[in-house]
Image (cartoon, rainbow, N blue to C red):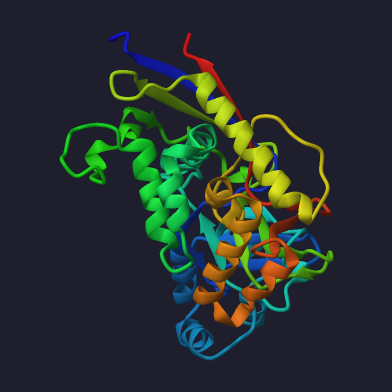
Amino acid sequence: MENYIKRYKIKLKTLSPVFIGSGKEINKKEYVYYRNSQEVYIPDMNRLFHDILKRNLDNEYQQYLMSENMPLLNWLKSVGYNNYEIKKFCNIHMDCSDALEKLNRQVAIQQFVKDAYGLPYIPGSSLKGAIRTCLLAEDIMKNPEKYGRVRRNVTPIFLGSKVKQTESLCFNNLNCKEEREDALNDEMKGVIVSDSKPLKYKDLTLCQKVDIGLNGGKNVPNILRESLRAGVTAEFDLSIDTKIVSLTKADIEQAVQNFYDMYKKVYVDKFIKIAAEKNTIYLGGGCGYGTKTVIYNLLGEKRGTEVIARFMSKKFSEHHYNKDVEAGVSPRMLKCTNYCGNIVEMGKCRIEISEES
């Protein structure tokens, strides 16, 4: 292999539940909830429906799907199934002790992304996107003069376009196309992050969305997510083409740490006080706007809060984001979940990068 290709191994350990959605859902009539054991069982619906046909219950099942609002477990028992018979159709079950008991009603479960064999994994694009955000923030902090014009012209109305300009200034340094903004000029194409090795279904748990306010109050909407539990380690391959991009392992590690330190200072510390951590990166959905943006790095804490608050207010007027400016933080809810009896942030991971031996 040519020596200008630098190869590394990445180990990503989840410190809290991580959700990366597939865009699919498990309907509330497609899973069985056992309240006493706090478990959810997911039937193979094809096998179950075949058995329903064998029992001549297809009319009753159709009526249930069209009109009945009872949980699937209740309906199955009402037409003669016992627990043993139900569970034999279920290949998958998950702990839900931190989730379903606090729901007002059973709801659809947002599914974690899975491979062709049905096993959960973390897409390389998700990890690369998180690293890219950290690298962009680092360049803004190291080279503030480069972004002076963008900084002066940022407004809530044009926030998205200005962030794109910022990315272009940072990464579009190749001369493949005349227009600088063309994606072919993006030097990050020289950074390849593989999908993670397949994980196990037992690595998943069910987590409920929990929003924590500045005063400690909680908002707990009826949203359930399949999420990787804390303590799971995912492995990736990282390749850097040094002919395209000048980037080292140390550059990534420093950018990740500095982004975390900044985010903790200007945002997380306003809600909860936790000890500083090393090599921490946020990944996936449900971990909050602040983990995905470089606005605080670009504009500073005060002006960044004002711009984000006004941007959110225009986009979601019903949520009164205009109050965030007075509160001194925006958005004024920290994205968390219940896990093992504690409130924890979503999407928190520890990243380790080592040279390939």
| Residue 341: percent from left, percent from top | 84, 54
Query: Which residue does the image show at 56% across and 40% down from the upper left?
Result: 200
> Does 334 appear above or below 236?
below
Query: Which residue does the image show at 41% across and 64% down from the upper left?
Result: 158
Query: Which residue does the image show at 42% across and 51% down from the upper left?
Result: 150
Residue closer to the observer: 165 or 73 = 165
Horizontal arrangement in the rendering, residue 261 relative to residue 44 (left or right): right
In what quadrant of the picture does the N terminus appear?
Answer: top left
> Does 218 appear above or below 148?
below
> Does 103 appear above or below 180?
below
User: Can I make out residue 275 in this image?
Assistant: yes
Query: Which residue does the image show at 45% across and 63% down from the upper left?
Result: 24
| Residue 203: percent from left, percent from top | 62, 43
Residue closer to the observer: 243 or 55 = 243
Quarter of the view holding residue 278: top right
User: Can I make out residue 92 in this image?
Assistant: no
Q: Give the number of marks.
A: 0
| Residue 131: percent from left, percent from top | 49, 36
